[in-house]
Amino acid sequence: MRKPHNLPPERKWLLPVLLASSLSISVLLFSTLRYGKPSRPSVLSDPSAYSTIRSPKPPRLAYLISGTKGDGPRLKRVLQAVYHPWNYYLLHLDLEAPNTERMELAKYVKSEPVFVAFDNVRVVGNANLVTYKGPTMIACTLHAVAVLLRQAKEWDWFINLSASDYPLMSQDDILHVFSYLPRDLNFIEHTSNIGWKEYQRGRPIIIDPGFYNSNKADVFWAKEKRSMPASFKIFIGSAWVVLTRSFLEFCIWGWDNLPRTLLMYYTNFLSSPEGYFHTVICNSKDYQNTTVNHDLHYIMWHNPPRQHPMTLTSRHFDGMVESGAPFARKFTKNNPVLDRIDRELLRRSAGGFTPGGWCMGNSILGRDPCAIYGNPEVIRPSESSKRLETLLLKLLDPENFRSRQCK
């Protein structure tokens, strides 16, 4: 019989030091991440101090992990690397993947004892056809959000990953730092300075065959061009986001017409995942001040930038670590650097889960320590959490935070 892991005893500790400006979210983060007297080590500077301090209740993260034909094993590996029983996970292999591959992934989810026990992993059975660079990618993401809103309760942030992504730290590290964040922050890289993309993406009109064909094909280009919109401002950025439940409810339920209007506009917009959420959030007075201009990914681009980012290898390992980002992309299948990340950053064995405070077993004789599990609310951050803390403090510094919102 598995016994729940009890939280460590609570001790008295000083309240966070409040800084002068209560209007800046960066001040809130800075003050809440640093506790106690100067002589006492903080949880992040000394992870072993966790045994003496009870952290705030961790947030819940809702993940969409997506892929296409041949990505089943990669989705499984990413899932194992980012899994935590406190979170929710939705896996999507698009319609190009054969049913046998999708069924194999679903079979694994249904047979894994940890997934069965916590019931927090789903595979999309009625798969969507996703056209590269087309709006069917946004349709697929919105479908996933709608499923998570209906089937997964009380989550705080939505994170989209692909089979080409991989974590650079454990979920315990991410959940620990996010425990101290205001729950209304949206991490979305964005800019209104679209430059050449106005003529290659904004003005052209495309048609996504994924809306009416059953086989994947490239988008069609119309001969006509269109003018730039006058009733809203276009923003573009990274397709990889960390968005709040509140904002996504606004996009799905839409208590004003902005999300629907922009969804119609982006139906004919090239690479709409790089613009839809960005334009919605920056044209909404309720949400434009909640943006943090970063996608929390480590991505290397060619100079000048190309359509796709560089493929990350072992020579990028130090840069990944120093970035403080919790995720990185783009990786090829079975790239040796993934094994190094598993070994040095995640402490994860092949085929096992990334260990966390919920794991009660040991790794003797190659065992998976997470095969025996306890209370999912137990969070044990590592030194990696300090790197994420440093990144967030930089992003939320008053000189960087407000000045980079929806500009």
Image: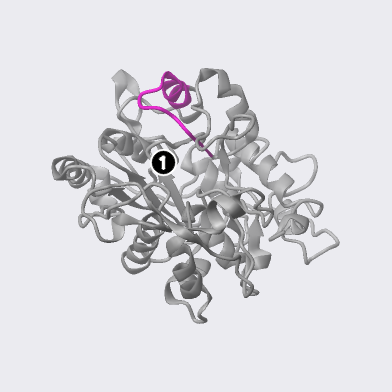
Residue furthest right in the image = 20
Residue 359: % across, % down? 38, 39
| Location of residue 231 (image quadrant) | bottom right
| Residue 358 screen position, x and y as percent | 40, 43
Determine which residue is flagged by label 1: 82
Q: Is residue 249 magenta?
A: no
Q: Is residue 57 visible?
A: no
Q: Amino acid at mark 1?
A: Val
Q: Residue at x 60, y 69 (%)?
A: 229
Magenta-colored span: 327-343
Q: Is residue 314 above or below residue 274?
A: above
Residue 332 coordinates in the image, percent (x, y): 40, 27
Residue 386, image x and y in percent? 64, 38
Name the one closer to the observer, 404 or 212.
212
* Colour scheme shown: one colour
Residue at the image point whose x is 62% and y is 36% from the top: 324
Instruction: Report the side of 320 relative to 391 (left or right).
Output: left
Q: Is residue 217 left or right of residue 295?
A: left
Name the one closer to the observer, 229 or 171: 229
Left or right: where 295 falls relative to 134: right
